[in-house]
Image: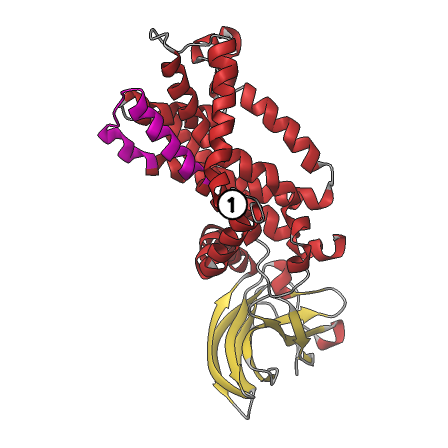
């Protein structure tokens, strides 16, 4: 079942109808006979979804078409009257067997736009399903790279409003109010610093003063503050906003985005606390702090990708909210935040160093405390992992979000 498209001409007819004249050459080994079920017709697909809308009448050949013989055909194509963009496949077929284009044969592809019942524009070209699959794959990859960023940019005002409401609502009615965004990370840092720095006498480097430990500990806590807050809340964020999920026009995929930005907001206050501690202990910031935005990019992508994945998974597995709390505790203590890197067991050091959070902690300490640039090989490797997780997490969330309303 093979055909080759020769010359063709497509012209608008009446209303949403197209007039088509084309030549087809039989490239197969048997004759096309109407008695054997050979015919030609067209199918109309929606350009946006690739869903089949309608199929035109099957027209038989007036005479048998022998192999290598060319036949000229005239066809009237009726497009839907509704405004929209459509794709028309014109191809021979064998009744109750298959369309030629489904078996790899050439077909005529017509792309047309209908506006208020009239053909506004049309274009045509010879194609094959292999070419169409390649183009569709390219479009899918392109959307996969651009759609997450387009979504965040398009709904930036809504994200900003929801993040503000989340932060303000978290402490509404308390005496401290918004100041808890400073008090909470400060108390947490001081608690850990007291336990590990004073009680357990943990020290970093040759300087055994408690202040040195406090600074190294706080620098390691900064990326953890943002990541743990977003990831810890991600499995339940869809349930918390179930009233929004059931609204068809609400962009559900921004819910994990709100968590990540709220976590970064908490980290900003953590940075201010850290800078205050830095000056208190007689240390200075260096120009290496300018590398911090470069570190934040993979941190943001990694956290958001993981949050998208967990947010979708949490809808199907209600226990994810409880499980992720335990996993975060394990993650925290397997990362050298509250103890020196030198205390990592030698035979397992490679496993700890593959920890993405380890790379972030080490990079923060390099630019904020040591006054040197971060180590680029691990940071670039983390960036690659973060990009893949960001795209895969969004694709995972986007795939399953249509099922959320039925499960809530």
The answer to whether one can see residue 137 in this image is no
> Is 17 located above or below residue 187 in the figure?
below
Query: Observer-nearest residue: 66 or 51?
Result: 51
Q: Say left or right for 400 vs 47.
A: right
Inspect the magenta stretch and tell me whether residue 76 lies in it. no
The answer to whether one can see residue 227 in this image is yes
Crowd around label 1: few <14 · some 14–19 · many ≥20 (10 Å): some
> Is 325 located above or below residue 108 in the figure?
above
Query: Observer-nearest residue: 347 or 4?
Result: 347
Residue 25: x and y in percent read 55, 71
Residue 297: x and y in percent read 39, 40
What residue do we see at 45% from left, 53% from top? Answer: 149
Colour mapping? secondary structure
What residue do we see at 52% from left, 48% from top? Answer: 167
Residue 252: x and y in percent read 59, 56
Mark 1, secondary structure of its residue:
helix
Q: Which residue is mark 1?
A: 177
What residue do we see at 64% from left, 31% from top? Answer: 325
Examine the image and state in which quarter residue 101 appears. Answer: bottom right
Magenta-highlighted residues: 266-292
Inspect the magenta stretch and tell me whether residue 291 lies in it. yes
Query: Observer-nearest residue: 317 or 8?
Result: 317
Q: Say left or right for 289 vs 10.
A: left
Q: What's the magenta bit mostly, secondary-structure-wise? A: helix
């Amino acid at each position: 079942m093979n055909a080759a498209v020769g010359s063709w001409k497509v012209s608008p007819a009446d209303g949403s109808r197209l007039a088509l004249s084309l030549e087809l050459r039989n490239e197969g080994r048997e004759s096309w006979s109407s008695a054997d079920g050979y015919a030609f017709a067209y199918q109309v697909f929606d350009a946006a979804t690739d869903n089949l809308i309608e199929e035109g009448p099957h027209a038989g050949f007036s005479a048998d078409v022998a192999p290598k013989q060319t036949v000229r055909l005239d066809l009237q194509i009726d497009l839907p009257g509704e405004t929209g963009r459509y794709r028309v496949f014109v191809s021979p077929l064998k009744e109750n067997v298959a369309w030629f284009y489904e078996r790899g044969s050439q077909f005529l592809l017509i792309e047309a736009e209908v506006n208020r019942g009239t053909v506004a524009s049309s274009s045509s070209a010879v194609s094959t399903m292999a070419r169409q699959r390649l183009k569709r794959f390219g479009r899918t990859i392109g959307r996969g790279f651009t759609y997450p960023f387009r979504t965040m940019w398009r709904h930036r005002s809504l994200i900003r409003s929801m993040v503000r409401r989340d932060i303000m609502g978290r402490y509404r009615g308390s005496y401290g109010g918004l100041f808890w965004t400073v008090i909470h990370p400060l108390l947490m840092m001081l608690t850990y610093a007291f336990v590990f720095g004073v009680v357990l006498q943990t020290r970093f480097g040759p300087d055994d003063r408690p202040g040195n430990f406090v600074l190294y500990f706080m620098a390691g806590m900064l990326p953890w503050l943002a990541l743990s807050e977003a990831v810890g809340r991600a499995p339940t964020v869809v349930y918390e906003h179930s009233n929004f999920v059931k609204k068809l026009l609400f962009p559900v995929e921004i819910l994990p985005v709100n968590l990540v930005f709220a976590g970064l907001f908490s980290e900003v206050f953590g940075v201010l606390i850290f800078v205050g501690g830095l000056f208190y202990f007689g240390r200075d910031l260096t120009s290496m702090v300018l590398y911090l935005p470069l570190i934040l990019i993979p941190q943001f992508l990694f956290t958001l990708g993981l949050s998208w994945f967990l947010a979708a998974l949490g809808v199907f597995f209600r226990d994810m909210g409880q499980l992720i709390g335990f996993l975060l505790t394990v993650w925290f203590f397997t990362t050298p935040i509250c103890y020196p890197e030198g205390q990592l067991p030698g035979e397992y050091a490679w496993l700890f160093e593959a920890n993405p959070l380890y790379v972030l902690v080490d990079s923060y300490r390099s630019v904020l405390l040591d006054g040197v640039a971060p180590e680029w090989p691990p940071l670039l490797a983390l960036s690659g992992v973060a990009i893949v997780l960001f795209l895969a997490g969004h694709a995972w969330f986007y795939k399953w979000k249509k099922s959320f309303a039925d499960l809530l």
